Amino acid sequence: MGKILIIGAGGVARVVAHKCAQVPEVFTEIILASRTLSKCNQIKKEIKEKTGIDIHTAQVDADNAKELASLIKKFKPDLVANLALPYQDLSIMDACLDAGVNYMDTANYEPPEVAHFEYSWQWAYQEKFKKKGLMAVLGCGFDPGVSNIFCSYAQKHLFDQINYIDILDCNAGSHGHPFATNFNPEINIREVTQVVRHWDEGKWVETPPILDGGSVHFTFDYPTVGPKESYLLYHEELESLAKNIKGLKRIRFWMTFSDNYITHLKVLQNVGMTRIDEVDYEGKKVIPIRFLKSILPDPAKLGSNYTGKTVIGNVMTGTKNGKKKSVYIYNVCDHAQAFKEVGAQAISYTTGVPAMICAMLMIKGVWKGTGVFNTEQLDPDPFMEALNKYGLPWTQTEFKGKLLE
Ligand code: NDP
């Protein structure tokens, strides 16, 4: 049916490549291109062993839109799936415009020199994509991605109006390292050291970062894994959902962190290892957070000893036929099972499967349009069905638990 060009060869890209290879009737050709060719070739080898499918590989610097555009023109994919880093979003979108191909990603743009992410930079591509008759789908991993689609599904089928949304992301797994991040350490640490924001009655409310004494947290009783301390965190889907879910009064995002993770990160921050500016080290310019990334465990390789589960979902409260109701929709994913299937832990798996589903719906023309879209702006039904079919089954229940009011 169509060709896909996957950019990146990290934890998430690996899952997307494996999952695409499992659906050869949709993805007739796959090319995996990244900065380090040997990582692409390693994934190619594993896919051949698991599925018998041959994929193509290539080396590319996705910061260079021209170089990437010529690769796209040579291979002529129907879709470019950006699973590199948020820094590359704009250059990859530029290359797609140049080469006339649709685009998707899982994280919004962030300039390397400022630890700040927002959609404005990518939303600014709206007219350019429209003019070329192309489609760009932003943020289709689990959160953002599935977390947005749970909202649009609830809006379409379960509520007349949703007033309150709490997205709760729990990793109750154990990787056996004293300290490691579950996706790219640089991006992860930049995200969790930020000032926290949530949206309340039409405005953004700021609270201290999770490493500060004054951070907002509470114990949430997650299905399957039990009570876990959950910290208020700013997450990118809050921005688009606050805009696209009409009548919303409040939206918050919560993530679990162990005391051990917070203690390590506090120390690293206090000694300056999370700095994103250049420092002079023996006559060389070094960016401490990049050095730190280079010595931390590679999230793409955490999978082999990972045990436990992730539980990610939304509690949504609103009204239906004049009556108040609260619904919880969530997925439980097992680290070891994910590793057995595609050689990756559950964080990469829960991001990569939705990315593959997005790519599949775009290639099939089920999700179509011109311009730039967040996932809640597209039909949730085929996506929700595909989650059940391709490895991320979800549960919907009446919510009777307790949130922080
Ligand atoms: P990794 O660091 O494991 O992988 C990133 C890959 O991108 C690496 O293979 C890297 O190459 C490649 N890359 C980096 N820069 C370039 C470049 N200039 N040109 C070509 N390739 C490049 O990250 P993850 O797989 O953990 O994360 C991938 C993306 O998924 C990130 O944007 C992350 O924010 C997002 N994400 C989204 C989630 C969601 O739920 N929405 C959850 C988790 C992650 P090299 O191997 O040479 O370093």
Image (cartoon, rainbow, N blue to C red):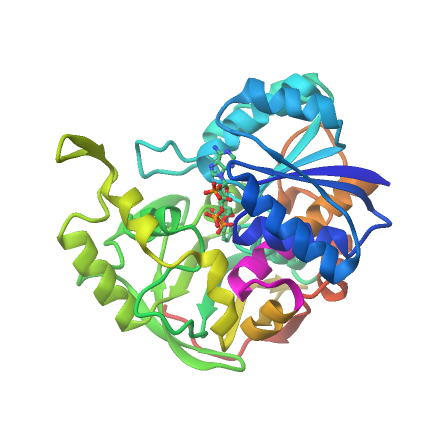
Residue 200 percent location from the top left of the image = 39, 51
Q: Identify whether 404 is placed above or below 215.
A: below
Side of 272 relative to 157 (left or right): left
Side of 23 relative to 241 (left or right): right
Q: Identify whether 68 is placed above or below 137.
A: above
Q: Is residue 197 visible?
A: no
Question: Magenta residues?
Answer: 341-354
Side of 74 relative to 339 (left or right): right
**What count of labels does the image hold?**
0
Residue 160 percent location from the top left of the image = 65, 57
Q: Nearer the viewer, residue 7 or 197?
A: 7
Residue 165 percent location from the top left of the image = 50, 59
Q: Quadrant of the C terminus?
A: bottom left
Q: Identify whether 125 is placed above or below 397.
A: above
Q: Quadrant of the N terminus?
A: top right
Q: Is residue 117 visible?
A: yes
Looking at the image, which residue is at 56% across and 62% down?
Answer: 344
Residue 212 percent location from the top left of the image = 19, 59
Side of 55 relative to 221 (left or right): right
Q: Nearer the viewer, residue 158 or 335?
A: 335
Looking at the image, which residue is at 79% across and 52% down?
Answer: 53
Give yes or no for residue 398 being in the magenta stretch.
Answer: no
Prevailing secondary structure class for the magenta stretch in the rendered image: helix
